[in-house]
Image: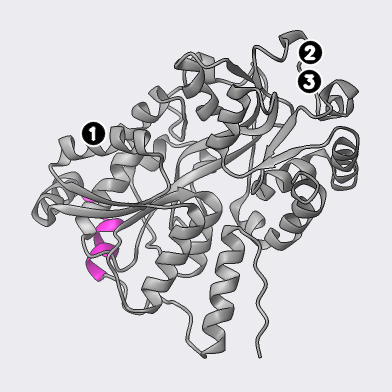
Amino acid sequence: MIACYSYRSAGFAVALLCCLYGAYALPPVNAQSANTELAAIANYSGADRSARILAGAKKEGVVSVYTSETVDDLAALTAAFQSKYGVRINVWRGSAENILQRAVVEARGGRFDVDAIETGATTMESLQREQLLQQVSSPAFADLKPEAIRPHREWVGTRYNVFVAAYNTDVVKKADLPKSYDDLTQPKWKGKLGVEAESSDWFGALVTALGEENGLALFRKIVATNGISARKGHTLLANLVISGEVPLAISTYLYKVAQLKSRGAPLDWVAIPPVVARFEGVGLARRAPHPYAAMAFLDFMLTDAQAILAKRHFEPASAKVSPSPDDALPPGMQPIFLDPAKALDQTQKWTKYYHDIITLQGR
C-alpha cells in the first residue's frame, strides 16, 4: 500500500501524481517522442525566422493554450494575437494546479493537444521537471529582465506579480499604514488583517528574506496578537478589502489592486519591505501539434503583449517596457524575485509552516 499526502499547491500536485503513477509502475513523462519540427523552429535563428514562423502559423491556423489568465486580461491578449497572426486561439482556463494536473495526465495518457502553457512560475518549473516543455530561444530574450530567463530555457517569464498590502481607503488612514512587518504586531491591527490562503511560496521567500528564525517568530506573534483571516484567491481577497471585511490584506497582487482602483474601488496598496515578486511564464509543449503557431504565441507574449500587459497594470518582463508610474514600487525599492526551483524543492517545508502558522489559525 502506498500512502500519498497532498497540500493544495502546484508542487504537491506533481508529488501526488507521481505517487499515484508509481503505484502502477508507470514510467515518468519524457521527451523521447518530442516534436522534431518544433525543436528545430524553437531554436532557429536564421534571417527568415519571423517569416517562417508566420507562414507556418497561418498554415496551421490554430494554437491551443492552457492558461490561468483572467477572462478580461486574456480577451485583450487573444484579440491582439489573432489580429496580428490571423491564427485562432483555443483556450482552456484553469488554476495553476489544475493546469499542471491536466498536462501531466494527458501526456501520460498519450494525448497531446496543448501547444503552449501560460501560468505561474512554480507550475511552469514543475512542468519542466516533468520534461513536458521544449527548450526555446527567441530574439526577444535580449530585451527581457535577466530574472525572466530560466537557465534551462524551457519556459520564460512574461510578467511578474508583486506582492503588496492592499487596504480599504475608507477604513484605514494612510498615516496609519505599516512601514514594516513588525508594525503588524501593533494592537490597532487586531481583527483587520487578511492573507491569501495558498501563498506559501510568497511566505517562504518573505520569511527567508527576514531571516528564517526571526521571520517565523514574527508571524507567530502577529497571528497570536492580532489574528489573520486566510481567504482563497487573490481576486476574492482584494474584493474583501473593497467591502471592508478585510481592511488590510498583506499578500495581494499589485496589478489586481491597481485594476480595481482604476475602476473607482476604495482601495490602494502599500509595499512593505522586503517585497516579493513572482513571475508568470510561458512555455511550449514538447509534443505541440501546432509548432509554428506555438512559437508565434511565445514570441507574441514576449513582444507585443508586453505593452498590453503594462497597460493592464502588470509588471512586464521586458526591460524596455515600463509599468505605469502608479504601479511602480517606491524609488530604490527592488523586489526579491521568488526562485521557482528553490520554491519547488521546499514546497513541503513552507506549505507546512504556512498551514500551521497562518491558515490553520486564520479559519
Q: Position of residue 344 (x, y in %)?
A: 63, 59
Q: Where on the picture, by quarter, is residue 35? A: bottom left
Left or right of residue 152: residue 274: right
Say which element carries label 3.
Answer: loop
Residue 299 to residue 110: above or below: above
Q: Amino acid at mark 1?
A: Ala
Say which element carries label 1.
Answer: helix
Residue at x 69%, y 38% (from the top left corner): 195
Q: Viewer-proximal residue, 267 or 13?
A: 267
Query: How far, Cα to Cα, is label 3 from label 1?
Result: 40 Å
Of the two numbered discs 2 and 1 in the rendering, the one whose residue sits closer to the viewer: 2
Left or right of residue 281: residue 199: right
Upstream in the sequence, badge 3 or badge 1? 1
Residue, disc 2? 176
Q: Where on the picture, by quarter, is residue 328? A: top right
Segment colored magenta: 36-46
Q: Position of residue 43 (x, y in %)?
A: 31, 57
Residue, disc 3? 178
Residue 2 to residue 141: above or below: below
In magenta segment, residue 42: yes
Residue at x 52%, y 82% (from the top left corner): 21
Q: Amino acid at mark 3?
A: Pro
Residue, disc 1? 80
Q: Viewer-proximal residue, 32 or 251?
A: 251
Say which element carries label 2.
Answer: helix
In magenta segment, residue 157: no
Q: Amino acid at mark 2?
A: Asp
Residue at x 22%, y 66% (from the top left corner): 37
Q: Position of residue 63 (x, y in %)?
A: 22, 53
Residue 160 to residue 355: above or below: above
Query: How far, Cα to Cα, is label 3 from label 2?
Result: 6 Å
Q: Position of residue 84 (x, y in %)?
A: 17, 36
